[in-house]
Amino acid sequence: MTTALMRRGWLLLMLLLAPVALAAIDTYEFETEEQRQRFYQVSGELRCPKCQNQNIADSDAPIATDLRREVHRMLMEGKDNREIIDFMVERYGDFVRYKPALSPATVVLWFGPAAMLLGGFIILIVMLRRRQRALREAAAHPLSKDEQQRLQSLLEREEDS
Amino acid sequence: MRRSWVIIPLLLFLGLTALFLKTLSDKKTQQDLAVDPSALPSALIGKPVPFFELPSLDDPEQLISPDDLKGEVALINVWATWCPTCRAEHAYFNKLVERGVTIYGVNYKDESEAARRWLAELGNPYRLNIEDPQGSLGINLGVYGAPETFLIDAEGVIHYKYIGAVDDRVWNNELGPRYQALIDQEAQ
């Protein structure tokens, strides 16, 4: 009795989960494993122009299906990844690249974060060095008697006020 | 002051803020956003209509190629019977034809029978209708949905693409002025 109930429970759960697994599936034949890998790689790098926050590998939009078919066709024709991506950019613009090409317009995009990180480190190092130098100088030149007295009086005046 | 550099990040931040604000309040940006923020500009602006050789919808024996679209400033409308927005804009194309605008159709990933029935029922504003059942011309044109409407000059060079239904507002603001500019250019 309980096992039958459990089995039903499992069945229900699986039915509920089934639609999740319905992401874009089509059957393509490849001659080599390398072609299959490249197919996944390229279609993962191309953004679907219709559903703009998905790549064409994940998207169910008709245009994504068509573009996957084109990717497959070009792969089987022996085109390399770059040629396939160029083909798409020629038709759909730079937008379809999830990895933007390195061009004067995208230099900041590519190197900006690294440059800022580097800049931060440089500033940090300069600050630390200055502080260390100041400490070293202070150690090398202890205050004279006069200076000690002046410091003392300054501190006292501070406390009074 | 030795510490004056600490305000550099603040200045950078303010500079970026100013740049973003300026871009956001820019008239051009607002127009683009008002139309459709997800619409992509065509990558084919300034390029000729890509090569194709596809049957005519009206007469499947007849093959159409880009040369058949030359000679006049014209619109190329990508449409299909499965596309509700295409039905919505269809009447407007009938009106545009009456005003003397040349329109070519690309019947995109459709069934020819259904398409012919639709034209018989709603009227046929298209001078020629290219059958593109596989969407191959669509891909070469950078089409990613229907309807899309291209503006071409007499040499078949693409000047503009509008994504979505063409109506009075779109014609008056987007397509019409560009169309007229091309006509004026040809007249010179």
Image (cartoon, rainbow, N blue to C red):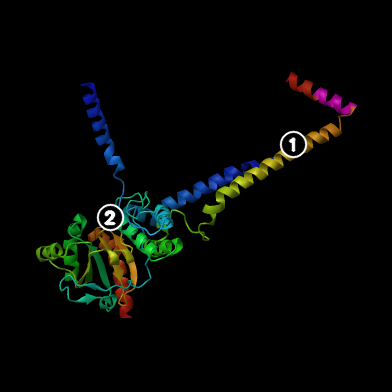
CA–CA distance in space, label 1 to label 2: 63 Å
Does the magenta-highlighted stretch encompass residue B46?
no
Q: Where is residue A63 in the image (x, y as percent from the top left)?
A: 30, 57
Q: Is residue B28 visible?
A: yes
Q: SS at mark 1?
A: helix
Q: Is residue B1 visible?
A: no
Which residue lies under the disc numbered 2? A62
Residue situated in front as seen by the camera: A26 or B7: A26
Which residue is most to the left?
A: B121
Counting the numbered discs, the total is: 2
Image quarter hosting the N terminus of chain B: top right
Task: Answer left or right for B122 relative to A27.
Answer: left
Which residue lies under the disc numbered 1? A131
- Identify the chain of the residue marked 1, using the numbered disc in the image: A
Residue situated in front as seen by the camera: A43 or A79: A79
Q: Position of residue B98 (x, y in %)?
A: 16, 70
Q: Give the range drawn in magenta.
A: A145-153
Residue A49's quadrant in the figure?
bottom left
Q: Position of residue A91 (x, y in %)?
A: 37, 64
- Identify the chain of the residue marked 2, using the numbered disc in the image: A
Which residue is most to the right?
A: A145
Q: SS at mark 2?
A: helix
Q: Where is residue A154 in the image (x, y as percent from the top left)?
A: 79, 25
